[in-house]
Image (cartoon, rainbow, N blue to C red):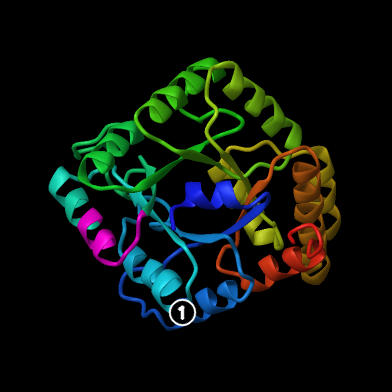
Amino acid sequence: MKITDIFKQNEITVSLELFPPKPGVGLGNIKKVVSECAELKPSFMSVTCGAGGGGSYNTIEVVREVQEVNGITALAHLVCVSLGRDEVSKMLGDLKAQGINNIMALRGDLPHGVSENTGDYRYASDLIEEIHKIGDFCVGGGCYPEGHPEAETLHKDIENLKIKVDAGCQFLTTQMFFDNNILYNFMFRLLKNGIDVPVVAGVMPVTNSKQIERIFKLSGAPVPPRFKAIVDRFSDNPKAMRQAGIAYATEQIIDLIANGINNIHIYTMNRPKNAKSIMDNLSEIFV
């Protein structure tokens, strides 16, 4: 099923994001993670290409596990940086052969040790156009509520998103954020500039102190004072930090849904128990 059709069917959707194992690592553990996430009955599950320009190594195998083995609609990330058209065409052909018709089209980061993009695509919008030429895919894209780190201004970032949507991006998924007011302001700017595709709000349950510095560095998201107070108080107590992080994410999602943001994406970090705790907390809301 195409994800845009899922949005039309459900008043509230909850999706989960996983990342594939590194090259050379077997799929045994990720199969268990996929199975446990599938038991939560998410609207769909997305599979990344790995952080830091990690490529698409095991993405196709994991999306097959999600959709064919566990019966959950899969969304495959496709990162175009440093890739040629032939490589992208092959990946799309492999996905189509597996029955995967939902793609998250991203520019991505340069691989470690690479200083410039040597591929055929400069922007995600270029990749989106290519995908639509090759097959009948449902294509999503990423967005940053605080503004893309490389954008000159917030207005310029919105202009670039409009180019992406005009190229055929059918829905947007946000980078993680920790202050809902930032998202509400972002939604206003989107609508003001004629961007009315569905927006999926990305929420990250931060449950241990080791995640914190890396998460805020990757996302570029500012640390809200309320969240900083939680980290300062509980980061040295793993059980308390996990409980507080789950509670913060739960409260964030409740506020989003109460204010009309009905598509929620949980960045699981391959920890199904964290996703389950959140979904248990919201069992009557997610009906």
Out of 280 and 25, give the one closest to the viewer. Answer: 280
Out of 1 and 250, give the one closest to the viewer. Answer: 1
Tell me which residue sits at (44%, 38%) in the image. 170
Q: Is residue 133 left or right of residue 248?
A: left
| Residue 135 drawn at (x, y percent) | 24, 48
| Residue 168 drawn at (x, y percent) | 36, 33
Query: Which quarter of the image is occupied by the C terminus?
Result: bottom right
Query: Which quarter of the image is occupied by the N terminus?
Result: bottom left
Query: To which quarter of the image does residue 236 belong?
Result: bottom right
Q: Range of the magenta residues?
A: 92-101
Query: To which quarter of the image does residue 56 belong?
Result: bottom left
Q: Is residue 156 above or below residue 131?
A: above
Q: Is residue 262 left or right of residue 124?
A: right
Q: Which residue is mark 1?
A: 31
Tell me which residue sits at (58%, 72%) in the image. 37
Tell me if residue 186 can be seen: yes
Type of amino acid under label 1: Lys
Tell me which residue sits at (60%, 16%) in the image. 192
Looking at the image, the residue that sits furthest to the left is 86
Out of 173 and 117, give the one closest to the viewer. Answer: 173
Q: Is 235 colored magenta in this rendering?
A: no
Out of 182 and 118, give the one closest to the viewer. Answer: 182
Q: Is 99 colored magenta in this rendering?
A: yes
Q: How many marks?
A: 1
| Residue 251 drawn at (x, y percent) | 82, 51
Question: Predominant secondary structure in magenta?
Answer: helix
Give the structural element (helix, strand or loop) at label 1.
helix
Looking at the image, the residue that sits furthest to the front is 9
Tell me if residue 236 can be seen: no
Q: Residues within 10 Å of mark 1 (few under 14, many from 20)?
A: some
